[in-house]
Image (cartoon, grey):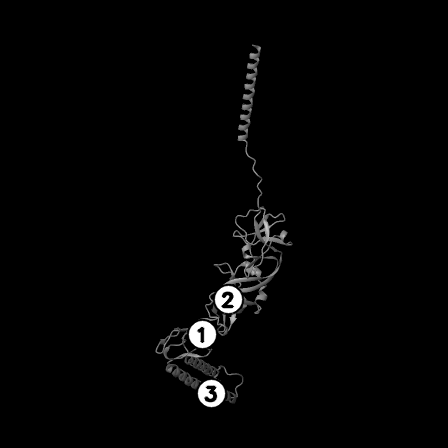
Amino acid sequence: MNKTLNKVVLFVITIAVLLGVVFYTGQMMAAQSQRSMPQPLETVARPDVSVIHVSTSSFAAEVEAFGSAEAHYAISLTAQVAGQVDEVSSRFEDGQRLSAGDWLAKLENSDYRAAVETAKQSLAQAEVSLLEEERQGMQALAEWQASGLDGEPDSDLVLRKPQLNAAQKTVEQAKANLASAQKDLSQSTIKVPFDALVVDRLIAPGSFVQSGTEVATLFSTDRVEITIALSARDWQNLPSLSMLSSGNWPVTLTSVEDGHQWTGKVLRAEQHLNGDTRQRSLIVSVNAPFDQSPALFPGTFVKAKVEGRLVDDLWQLPSSALSQRGEIWYVGEDDTLQKFTATALFSKAGDIFIAPPKELSKQQVAVLSHPLNSYLQGMAVNPVEETSND
């Protein structure tokens, strides 16, 4: 019986141990299933950025602006006297170049010729009257002296001084009348006042014109002038006004339409601001524009490039280095991105020129050539030197 009891006890103990083992194993497996798997450490890759190494230097500024070539003189020529157009010059046509003094049209002038002859006759009569009065005055003086009276006559009429003065004035008036009549006669032939291009002819044979009637539109051919409006920053990039106005400061002019180029000179600078644009203008001239090769015609729209003063401590960068937000991005010493706000002082041949912060002006800096809007300040990057395509 004891043996049987011992077997039962041993069986119960064995069953308990087995249940304990099963329970422990289940708990361990459940705990293991709920345990998070260890994640492998992720290595953050630094993006490559294209950079160019720049340092400050001195550069000659260049100012660009646009303007239209205009004739030095542009006038509407008018008739000075009235009359019917008798004859029109064969050269008086649109597009013809004429010299100062060339005649354009002749008016019927018989009345003006008659007026000249009348004025000549009046002058001749006045001169005769003056001679007669001078002789009478001399005779009156002789008679006064022969009378033996002392002193001067009581009246100037005795020696005929007023009569002589009136005769002299009559001659002067007659001369003035003759000059006026001759001027009217000369103006019956309409002439070119300066070397000019005929832009528009407004009369024809048989036309009747009054004094003040427009007969032609003329452009002078001595030079064209281009007025270019400049901002305050543009003026800061230019040399002194005395240097600009010396007459020798060159300006390169390029036709916007076909790319033809001419060389002009700075003529003068306006000394006031435009009320609408709040800008001040520089006047550029090209002499003998019609004799240039090719000719520079009035009305041509051009881009003007004016060489400016020498500016120190500037970076020369491609225009793509300036972001859309007006920022320059560069790589710091720890290969992280840094930036600053900048404005191009001027541009030349596709490059921009900016003044960097003082702390960067005395060192070589790796500047991003194509910054992206997604870049963040302090972002770690791998700078790659940009190679030239040449």
Foreground label between 1 and 2: 2
- Tell me if residue 133 comes above or below residue 263 in the rendering: below
Residue type, mark 3 in image: Leu
Residue type, mark 1 in image: Leu
Front position in the image: 59 or 140: 59
**Where does the image place residue 175, in percent across and percent down from the top left?**
45, 82
For disc 3, the marked residue is: 131
Of the two numbered discs 1 and 2 on the same chain, state the one appearing first in sequence: 1
- The residue tagged with tag 3: helix, strand or loop? helix
Q: Split into 4 quadrants, where in the image is the N terminus?
A: top right
Mark 2–mark 3 Cα distance, whole angstroms, equals: 71 Å
Front position in the image: 347 or 70: 347
Residue 254's disc is 2
- The residue tagged with tag 1: helix, strand or loop? strand
Quarter of the image for residue 316 reads: bottom right
- Tell me if residue 314 comes above or below residue 81 in the rendering: above
Quarter of the image for residue 79 reads: bottom left
**Where does the image place residue 288, in percent across and percent down from the top left?**
50, 73
Residue 187 appears in the figure: no
**Where does the image place residue 53, in percent across and percent down from the top left?**
61, 55
Front position in the image: 184 or 309: 309
